[in-house]
Amino acid sequence: MKVGDCLKVSGPVDRPEATKADCGSTVSNFKVAAVVAKSNQCPTDVDSYYSQSSTFTPESTTVCLDIDWLVGGCMSVDPENDRDPYRVDCADSGAANRQRATQVLAGVASVDQCASGLGYAYDERQFTVCVENVA
């Protein structure tokens, strides 16, 4: 996996499964922000990470992950739950915690610049994903 690739990450926290997916597709929920040797080398503001090791070598690889936001698209994001975010139809009233990405601000790490006042600020990498809750 390389920076910019997208993944579908699912499964339990102690044994997640990751498969490559098309960015912005209905199954993609994360985008690779960095590939490093250890999780503590990820940028401090990534949304998650996935470490993989080989049974044949002592080396491991960690992919540092951001949510695969698509401006205009919705994700179900529940930070109170250990569940990974997943893409949902914005019109699906049955999907909990729907958030629509409205814009991505480069060079800004503050939700104050978002029209809705809601979003995700990435301090280290200086960008913000603005969102709105979908009722």
Image (cartoon, rainbow, N blue to C red):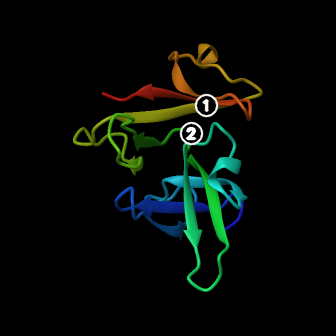
Disc 2 marks which amino acid?
Answer: Val
Q: Quadrant of residue 80?
A: top left
Q: Residues within 10 Å of mark 1 (few under 14, many from 20)?
A: some
Query: Which is nearer the eye, 25 or 34?
Result: 34
Q: Residues within 10 Å of mark 2 (few under 14, many from 20)?
A: some
Distance CA(mark 1)–CA(mark 2):
6 Å
Coordinates of residue 119 in the picture (x, y in percent) = 53, 26
Q: Earlier in the sequence, mark 1 or mark 2?
A: 2
Q: Is residue 75 left or right of residue 110?
A: left
Coordinates of residue 48 in the picture (x, y in percent) = 54, 48
Residue farthest to the front, as pictured: 58
Coordinates of residue 34 in the picture (x, y in percent) = 71, 54
Residue hosting label 2: 71
Q: Quadrant of residue 123?
A: top right
Mark 1, secondary structure of its residue = strand
Q: Is residue 126 left or right of residue 9?
A: right
The image's mark for residue 72 is none
Disc 1 marks which amino acid?
Answer: Gln
Q: Residue at x 70, y 59 (%)?
A: 35
In what quadrant of the picture does the C terminus appear? top left
Q: Is residue 12 left or right of residue 25?
A: left
Residue hosting label 1: 103
Coordinates of residue 71 in the picture (x, y in percent) = 56, 39
Residue farthest to the left, as pictured: 94
Depicted 110 relative to depicted 120: above or below? above
In what quadrant of the picture does the N terminus appear? bottom right
Depicted 41 relative to depicted 134: above or below? below
Residues marked 1 and 2 touching at CB (< 8 Å): yes
Q: Residue at x 34, y 59 (%)?
A: 12
